[in-house]
Amino acid sequence: MTLVHAFIASTAFPIAKIAKVKRYIKVLGGLKEAARAIKLAGGIAAARQARGVLRDLVIEIGGFALIESNCL
């Protein structure tokens, strides 16, 4: 892999992650509503056990997505 390929690969992942987080926040009704949903769920740990978009958001922002993809 050349240096250019390494650079493209290293920047593509964060861009994809940001796009996912933005999509999840939009589905939840905006940043304030997303934060409120996490708080109402009982925090990050409890929201991680939730289902749907809230769980997906927490997994993505917490870095758990990478861990789960490597362990499953």
Image (cartoon, rainbow, N blue to C red):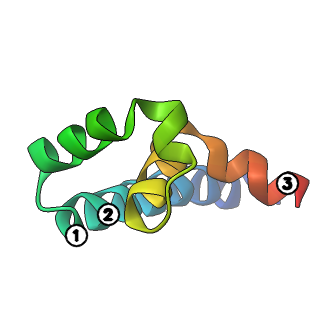
In the image, residue 55 sits, relative to residue 58, either above or below, namely below
Q: Is residue 11 left or right of residue 23?
A: right
Q: Marks 3 and 1: in contact by CB < 8 Å?
A: no
Q: Which residue is mark 3?
A: 70
Q: Marks 1 and 2: in contact by CB < 8 Å?
A: yes
Q: Is residue 21 left or right of residue 6?
A: left
Q: Is residue 39 left or right of residue 20?
A: left
Q: Quadrant of the N terminus?
A: bottom right
Give the SS element for disc 3.
helix
Can you tell which quarter of the image residue 30 is in?
Answer: bottom left
Label 2 vs label 3, nearer the camera: 2
- Alpha carbons under labels 1 and 3: distance apart: 27 Å
Label 1 is placed on what type of residue? Val
Disc number for residue 27 = 1
- Alpha carbons under labels 2 and 3: distance apart: 22 Å
Give the SS element for disc 1.
helix
Label 3 is placed on what type of residue? Asn
Mark 1 or mark 3: which comes first in sequence?
A: 1
Q: Which residue is mark 2?
A: 24
In the image, residue 31 sits, relative to residue 42, either above or below, namely below
Rendered location of residue 16, percent (x, y): 46, 63
Label 2 is placed on what type of residue? Tyr
